[in-house]
Image (cartoon, rainbow, N blue to C red):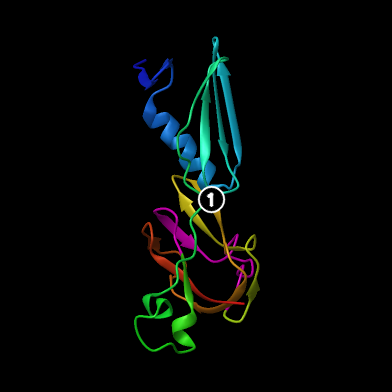
Amino acid sequence: MPTANLSRTDLNLEIAVELKDIKAIIDLMRKNSISEFELEREGFKIRLKRGGNGGGQLMVGDEGAAVLPVVPAPQILPPAAAAGQGPVTTASLDQDIKSPMIGTFYRAPSPEAAPYVDVGSEVMPDTVVCIIEAMKVMNEIKAEAKGVITKIVAENGKPVEFGQPLFKIRPN
């Protein structure tokens, strides 16, 4: 297996995991709101931990640590109008809940079940609003903000892209 090398002025660690594998683990941590991950095999140990401020660190081996950023879970971004680039109306206060991945959008856990949310539903940051199926894995997507759903943008059962708006939410 190829190795990736990280070096720091007084620290030179050889990692027995490919960098792309570490990035995949970080991505899974972000998507599933996992704050800590640890893997140990054949004398090799890696520990990933997300900090409360959005930062994180990668700890390798028994004696050394190298700091790497771990990107926080996707945040709801305000529209440009709410940032003072035009007249602010009630509709311009709405924010997007965006897709954190490519996949198929589903509003409900199964075809015969009720949707997770509808227009007018009040949501909390940890409220599941939909599922995105990616590579036969069902990923629950959370609101990440407190507010009211004002519009359902994505179409049930249709593909969505990374960053595509799924819902409009009015924060409260």
Residue 86 picture quarter: bottom left
Taking the image as shown, residue 51 lies to the left or right of residue 163, namely: right
Q: Label 1: which residue?
A: 138
Q: In the displayed image of the protein, which residue is found farthest to the front?
A: 9
Residue shown at 60% from the left, 72% from the top: 117
**Helix, strand or loop under label 1:** strand
Residue 115 is covered by the magenta coloring: yes
Residue shown at 63% from the left, 77% from the top: 121
Taking the image as shown, residue 145 lies to the left or right of residue 21, namely: right
- In this rendering, the answer to whether 87 lies above or below 122 is below
Quadrant location, the C terminus = bottom right
- In this rendering, the answer to whether 61 lies above or below 150 is above
Secondary structure character of the magenta stretch overall: loop
Question: Residue 63, image x and y in percent?
Answer: 56, 15
Residue shown at 57% from the left, 24% from the top: 39
- Callout 1 crowding tier (Cα within 10 Å): few <14, some 14–19, many ≥20: some
Residue shown at 39% from the left, 53% from the top: 102
Question: Residue 122, image x and y in percent?
Answer: 65, 75
Q: In the displayed image of the protein, which residue is found farthest to the top?
A: 43
Question: Residue 53, image x and y in percent?
Answer: 56, 49
- In this rendering, the answer to whether 90 lies above or below 171 is below
Quadrant location, the N terminus = top left
- In this rendering, the answer to whether 76 lies above or below 58 is below
Q: Amino acid at mark 1?
A: Met
Question: Residue 112, image x and y in percent?
Answer: 61, 66
Residue 87 picture quarter: bottom left
In front of the other: 108 or 61? 61
Which region of the structure is painted magenta?
A: 98-118
